[in-house]
Image (cartoon, helix red, strand yellow):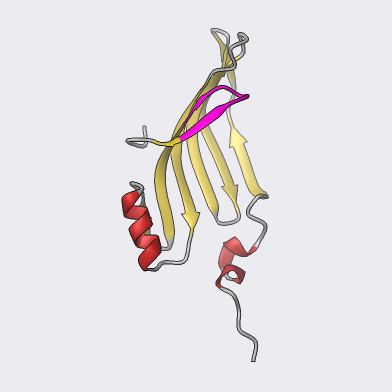
Amino acid sequence: MKLMHFNDLGPAKNDPSSFNFISTDLQLANQRIASTKIDIDGYGVDVDGSGSVSVSGSNALDYHGMAQITTKQGFFTNTFGRLSGGKLVDGKLTFPFRISGTIQNPVFAKADDDK
């Protein structure tokens, strides 16, 4: 009898660093490249967001959105989800995020809301 590891189940069984779908709109104005809708769907990951990056030399980032990660539900996952400000619903850990800093030194953080 062969036992399956929990990572071998569902969409997360594929390479988590590969993507199934990436879509965005791009607008160039005021020396910034802006996107009002960014949609990244990976294997076990779904990210929706918006924001902009400066092309004036500072390379400043200003992005925010909501991420969903498929996860096995359990005591530690539920506890971590609550402590980090995320919500665990239907096997997905959902949390708001913000990316600031620069292209060379991005800063990833939990956002206060899903703007």
Q: Nearer the viewer, residue 30 or 86?
A: 86
Q: Residue at x 48, y 61 (%)?
A: 71
Q: Give x and y (percent) for residue 14.
A: 66, 61
Q: Give x and y (percent) for residue 77.
A: 40, 61
* Horizontal side, residue 76 vs residue 22: left or right: left
Quadrant, the N terminus:
bottom right
Circle count: 0
Q: Nearer the viewer, residue 98 or 89?
A: 98
Q: Residue at x 63, y 24 (%)?
A: 104
The answer to whether 50 is drawn above or below residue 80 in the figure is above
Quadrant, the C terminus:
top left
Q: Give x and y (percent) for residue 43.
A: 60, 55
The answer to whether 38 is drawn above or below residue 8 in the figure is above
Q: Give x and y (percent) for residue 19.
A: 65, 48
Q: Residue at x 36, y 67 (%)?
A: 75
Q: What stretch of residues is rendered in magenta?
A: 99-108
Name the chief secondary structure element in magenta: strand
Q: Nearer the viewer, residue 73 or 25?
A: 73
Q: Is residue 90 one of those drawn in magenta? A: no
Q: Nearer the viewer, residue 17 or 75?
A: 75
Q: Quadrant of residue 80?
A: bottom left
Q: Residue at x 54, y 51 (%)?
A: 45
Q: Quadrant of residue 109?
A: top left
